Image (spheres, coloured by chain):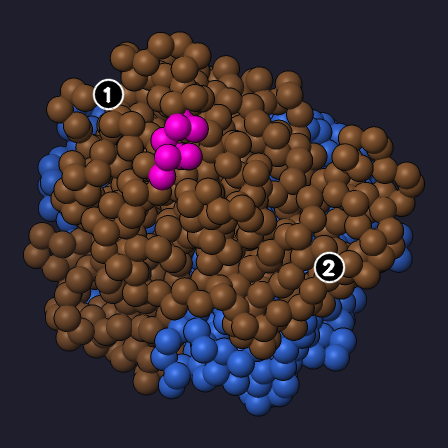
Chain colours: A brown, B blue
Amino acid sequence: MPDKGAALSQLKISRVGIDTGRENVAVMSRRSRAFRPEVFRGFSRVSVRAGEKSLLATLLITDDDSLVGAGELGLAEPAFRRLALPPGSMVTVAPATPPGSLEAVRAKILGRTLSAGEIEAIVDDLAHYRYSDMEIAAFLIGSASFLTSDELLALTGAMARAGTQLSWNGKLVVDKHCIGGIPGNRTSMIVVPIVAAHGLMIPKTSSRAITSPAGTADTMEVLSRVDLGVEEMKEVVTACNGCLVWGGHVNLSPADDVLISVERPLSLDTREQMVASILSKKMAAGSTHLLIDIPVGPTAKVANASEAMRLRKLFEFVGDRNAISVEVLITDGHQPIGHGIGPVLEARDVMDVLANAPRAPVDLREKSLRLAAHLLEYDPAMRGGTGYARARELLDSGAALKQMHRIIDAQGPTSCNTGLGPLTADIRAPRDGVVAAIDCYRFNRLARIAGAPIDKGAGVDLFKKIGDRVEQGEPLYRIHAVAESEFDMAVTAATADSGYEIDGKAAPAAATS
Amino acid sequence: MPDKGAALSQLKISRVGIDTGRENVAVMSRRSRAFRPEVFRGFSRVSVRAGEKSLLATLLITDDDSLVGAGELGLAEPAFRRLALPPGSMVTVAPATPPGSLEAVRAKILGRTLSAGEIEAIVDDLAHYRYSDMEIAAFLIGSASFLTSDELLALTGAMARAGTQLSWNGKLVVDKHCIGGIPGNRTSMIVVPIVAAHGLMIPKTSSRAITSPAGTADTMEVLSRVDLGVEEMKEVVTACNGCLVWGGHVNLSPADDVLISVERPLSLDTREQMVASILSKKMAAGSTHLLIDIPVGPTAKVANASEAMRLRKLFEFVGDRNAISVEVLITDGHQPIGHGIGPVLEARDVMDVLANAPRAPVDLREKSLRLAAHLLEYDPAMRGGTGYARARELLDSGAALKQMHRIIDAQGPTSCNTGLGPLTADIRAPRDGVVAAIDCYRFNRLARIAGAPIDKGAGVDLFKKIGDRVEQGEPLYRIHAVAESEFDMAVTAATADSGYEIDGKAAPAAATS
């Protein structure tokens, strides 16, 4: 929205090869032919238009003519990609006034409750990249301090409606979601084939890792393509009852992606924002029945049962009012699930469970069966209490494995390098004892430092879990990396703090069995 | 603060000619030799070290080798300037963990009251540019919703102590400050010479315009140099009892400048932040007696008397607890003060008042005398009620003008182009009537669009004020500009909305006299 008092000036667009994350950034010469950007320093945002296309961008100034000349407007990634015009195209540039919905953001900060219409306008501007990072932070923080129940409902609904909305012809559509934080917790890749093999529809979209070493989409990508569009995804679901795709190309609740891009660097994570984020995505995906996994443990996202209970109530409340049946399972989040942390290692664990291999991690198998059991009982034809037996039958018989291969074939082959990281180092027990604790937060970070998920084969392979007896010098886990520099950083980090707590006293009876 | 788990990598610094405002920004190649920046995407900040020097910067990624190569670390302005090392110098780069004080910021957002120690740590990190723009926004917004009285006192004190602290050997030091918003309101440049001529010490530092068309420093720069360092400023004050310099080189309350750089783009302006901002600067300047001017009017910063009163109480409370005697004057903010808006035009008005020229604006003269009267009565030798007569005597006798010339000579000659903008357009009355209102906000913006303060000679010269009778076609004001493009934009803006309200009915008796 150009200011009505500002004349319009034409500039040629050029591409500035700098990745500015999610924010639109434009670069102008201090000697620009359009207007001297310093005159508009106080405004700091520009509107860029070409025919029907337009965007708002944060303005940076340059004195370097080789970067952006006086007759040019430089567009950094992703603004260049979003405008989608060839370099040299003429655009109209004008100082921009901020989106009108920012008035409501300011009111929220100062303590006013917002109407559903105001929240709808904010979400629309967020979803269309009209807010700067700072403006996004303003909304996030303003709503982090306090949000009424009505505001939370309005926010969740507006977010769900702001992007693609899938519908499945009135069918029962089940889904599961874990709030995250537990390394190796790849239950979706086991639950989806079990539930789809049974015949229920489970069109699962997942995120890629942002600060963790692997999202379900990163791990699934070891086995198949995951960047499917909406139509391709529907074909897979029609053929296989389920899918395991990346949500990024499906554009479900795009405002959520925008909010997350600022929430993460600020490490802001409120219950309300978590509920709006997860439920808006699932509502947009057309889910009718949703199972939410909340792991609880000292180094998990939720540290104790009472906090888990408050979160559960909030999920159920917002789900209820939005005609989506939400069930919440509170699970053990004391340590990583399975052995592997990082895409290739996690994919190995998943396939071991599906193939009933002897080395398959028991905890990953048991947790997946438990979650699948709940989902299967949404089938009106199932009798209550029979879900677990049915899930085990589908897994043990190989039906789930067969279904997984169908899904993999339907999604198509991966183009990633899926070899395991060849640089390895074993981290060993400093003394005899019993494993008393494993720090989830540290292992997420360690696998990330080793190169996951950029390097699919990087990560950590755990040999010991809580309760296991270890001898001094025995390997606790193995670091895998692809690049030398990251390997060194990971080994240094693991040497400084292994992430394991070894109890040196006599092991309790249970642990010795 | 590098993460202890991260190995340290050496890169050569290069200068990236992009002005990123206040924020430190570093650019790394996606193929960097130090580490692949994408691996650290979730962290997004890096620490840069060279010997004793270090800074934290927000990380952007490039694929353009001509911009930043694999062995280089690009530093945008102002990070390059702050590190102050020649291009090609080797630096150590590591993923950075955020400043520890951010924990307190998160706690504040979630509703906890902060201790004085926590606030001190936040202010120290702000003053040393350790926060990203988003992190600054987080603190600003978190404290905008609610701040206890103790938190406000701690914040003001910590800000005052975070930079240069001037002291004047126990002397009585007076100062004045206007909260801003009224175009042409250049009373300081008349008050300072009057008060200094009387013999009181008034070491005035002022800001440059950020979103307005002129700060006192911009206008004073038409007459003399203003970018004096601390020692130069002290010399001027010793010689002349007063000065009129830009605060930018004196480094008073640097955390305030950091907060303002984010407050402005967000248009966040709370009473608490205003009080902390103004009083921290004045405490650091060593003022003992401070007069605050709060203009009230429909297009001023403060719209009504009750809001002005709440602000006044807050100024008095924080001043009291910090041993600075604060007096608040509530003044008429219905329209611009004087005729000129923009540095050259405002400097003309100021010198006309000091010279007792017939065309000197009466409102600027009267307001300055009133403010000077209050300041003069801080002199223990003055009897109560005699301040106004003394101020008028100093002005009418030419003593104030003489003092102003002394200050100008002591500060040294300006190096600016101080000619009046040669491109002019008169905006005329659309019909006969009486001027009923003049929009302060619009005139700030209009003079800014015309090029002020970048072009000292750009701005607006008002011919009519509220109550003046005008005939159709008679000029209301004249736009001055230096550059064609800005001239066109300003004329377009003024044509769309003149900023004047003309009452077409018979003028009230008072206005016809």
Give yes or no for residue A396 being in the magenta stretch. yes
The image position of residue B339, as x and y in percent, is 37, 51
Residue name at image x 21 percent, y 38 percent: A240
Answer with the quarter of the image where residue A76 lies: bottom left
Range covered by the magenta-colored residues:
A391-398
Compared to residue A47, the image places residue A155 above or below, namely: above
Q: Are marks 1 and 2 in contact (CB under 8 Å)?
A: no
Question: Which one is earlier in the sequence, the residue at label 1 or at label 2?
Answer: 1
The residue lying furthest to the left in this view is A51
Residue occupying image coordinates x 58% and y 82%: B11
Q: Nearer the viewer, residue A245 or B316?
A: A245
Marks 1, 2 in one chain: yes
Q: Residue B137, image x and y in percent?
A: 53, 45
Which residue, given by chain and number where applicable, does mark 1 sit on? A172
Residue B169 image position (x, y, % from top left): 89, 57
- Main secondary structure found in the magenta portion: helix
Residue B64 shows up from this direction: yes
The outermost residue toward the right is A505
| Residue B219 visible in this rendered orientation of the protein | no
Protein chain holding label 2? A
Q: Is residue A336 above or below residue B249?
A: above
Give the amino acid at mark 1: Leu
Residue that badge 2 annotates: A475
Q: CA distance from mark 1 to mark 2?
A: 47 Å
Quarter of the picture containing the N terminus of chain B is bottom right
Q: Chain of mark 1?
A: A
Residue type at the position of mark 2? Pro
Q: Nearer the viewer, mark 1 or mark 2?
A: 2
Q: Position of residue A373 (x, y in %)?
A: 42, 23
Residue drawn 32% across the image and 85% down it: A66
